[in-house]
Image (cartoon, rainbow, N blue to C red):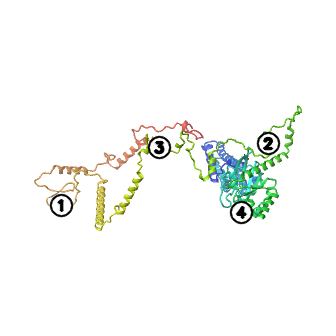
Amino acid sequence: MAYYNFKKIAVVPTAKDFIDIVLSKTQRKTPTVVHPGYKISRIRQFYVRKIKFTQQTYHDKLALIITEFPKLDDIHPFYADLMNVLYDKDHYKLALGQVNTAKNLIDNVSKDYARLIKFADSLYRCKQLKRAALGRMCTIMRRQNQSLQYLEQVRQHLARLPSIDPNTRTILICGFPNVGKSSFINKVTRADVEVQPYAFTTKSLFVGHMDYKYLRWQVVDTPGILDHSLEERNTIEMQAITALAHLRAAILYVMDISEQCGHTISEQVHLFNSIKPLFTNKPLIVALNKIDIVRPDDLQEQTKEQIRQLEGEGALVLPMSTVTEEGVIDVKTRACDMLLSQRVEAKMKGKKMPDILNRLHVAVPTPRDGVERPPFIPQGAKLNKSGVAVVVDTGKKKLERDVELEMGDDYFLDLKKKYLLSDESHKYDVIPEIYEGKNIADFIDPDIMQKLEELEKEEELREAAGEYDVEVEDEETLQTRRTAEQIRAKKKLLRMKSWNKKTTNYPVMPRTAVRASRPQHKSKGDQDMDEGQEVTDEGCVKPVLAGRKRARRQSAVVSRSKSHSVVRQPRDKSGLRDAVQVAKARKKMKFDQRKFVQGGKSGEADRKIGTVLPKHLFSGKRKMGKTQRR
């Protein structure tokens, strides 16, 4: 288990979010009501409490950031150098230092303004000092925006780093890019590292875990390393160099003997010699990968000599292929055994081992008589030990998987061969398909295919005779079709117009109604010139009917028009003599309605009682928790 869990670091908010969080918490957690009538000591205490609460909130949150981020001087050198490679150690320390300085400045601002409020002599001055104190604190935080954003990016990247324990049993894979490092870790562990046929597919450290001899092992896949000086290596390569320098692990240097990675064997050997100081005091294995393409025996003599030189320098050279998995398990086993033996030797040389050995006592029994009692060894084990092949019938059943491997592509899964039937010849009979108690085969015409062919031939003859050909219309038929289209369009337009007339938005007058005649005003001279006409009192001109009575309908129309022409006086002005009385009556009406307006009533008959808000339920400040009672 790793000692460092960077995923638990809390989120670092931006300066704006930081200020909003702290000020809203101050507003929620401190009293909000103060009056000028309070004692000045009480007013001072009110505002000092707000300043100190804000300062303490800033202090706690900034201290949490400083505490949770790892200190480069206290963590393992592997993580310290890795963070230096990834984030620049100076920039990281500077950001944390600025956050620490901001915390101290906010503490000093709180102390200074708490001291100044003791000399304030009014609520206004106390409030202004409080505003100034909180404003200076927010200004200090606003200046730390860049540092906070940088720390948030570092936190996000740290959370994505793999959990590597620098002190546990580790196999470290290194070499040129595209030589098969990621393929090896995918084969021996449960990791799933991306594998592509181009260089630098792996751009960061990847870790996988496996079990060997009931122990948990971690396998670290490093990015590819190119053969140039340390100063010219980029961030991706420096991650691999950092892991090689600080992890106590078994080193697995992977070489591509087929040279498909783009680098010759001589270049790979030269890189091995360049980083050989990082292999000191560590078990070292050189894995010759891609032997499925080129076998080690097929290499040139000069290349074989270079590989033999690697064996002379203390490296164990083993062939393997991650495609066919040949030699992969052997490489893993040898690397684990070498690392285990080295760790045991290191513990034996430690200071604690003599104390442990002094507690151990090996009891050797004394012989009770002179009878020789040799150990019992089975005959089969003796023959096997002497080199004689012993054929033992284990009685293992041949599985279907074994049959599949033997036959290869010719294999066919036969599910009917295990059927238990009285007659073996019935195994491959066609099973009838039953639907609603009836056999479907009974309803299938045996001559259906022959009938289908006859139908198809008949259709071909009809097509050849031109039965399905489309007749070409002449000009007269086309003209008739166009005329019919125009007639249909015209009819549709007329229907739309008729519908629009029907859907009117004014009231429809009944048939019995008669249109009222408008008054026609004429001059006095015109009236004298008109003969046979009479001018009514309303100024309307109507003909004089000599010797004939008016019809009932005409008189009714005239009386109705007279009644509509009379202008009625408004109710608020009826019975009042002049404008003075109207104004006086309106003023008295407003005065009488005042109690209803102030009470929120709609009139004298309004008896509704509004929502009652009991003071013990709805007064005071809301706190955390349920809102049923406040």
Question: Which of pointers 1 and 2 lies earlier in the amino acid sequence?
Answer: 2
Three-letter code, disc 1: Gln
- Nearest-to-viewer mark from 4 and 2: 2
| CA distance for labels 3 and 2 | 61 Å
Residue 430: give x, y in percent of width and height: 49, 45
Q: In the drawing, what numbered circle is on residue 191? A: none
Question: Which of pointers 4 and 2 lies earlier in the amino acid sequence?
Answer: 4
Circle 4 — which element?
A: loop
| CA distance for labels 1 and 4 | 127 Å
- Nearest-to-viewer mark from 3 and 4: 3
Question: Which of pointers 3 and 4 lies earlier in the amino acid sequence?
Answer: 4
- Nearest-to-viewer mark from 1 and 3: 3
Q: Is residue 348 above or below residue 85?
A: above
Three-letter code, disc 2: Lys
| CA distance for labels 1 and 2 | 157 Å
Question: Would you name the residue on which mark 4 appears?
Answer: 259
With 606 as the anchor, is 557 left or right in this view? left
Circle 1 — which element?
A: helix
For the view shown, which residue lies furthest in the left direction?
547
Tell me the residue at 27%/52% (across/down): 508
Name the quadrant of the C terminus.
Answer: top right
Nearer-the-camera pick, 234 or 597? 234
Q: In the drawing, what numbered circle is on residue 527? A: 1
The answer to whether residue 540 shows anywhere in this view is yes
Q: In the drawing, what numbered circle is on residue 432? A: 3
- Nearest-to-viewer mark from 1 and 4: 4
Question: Would you name the residue on which mark 2 appears?
Answer: 382
Residue 269: give x, y in percent of width and height: 77, 62
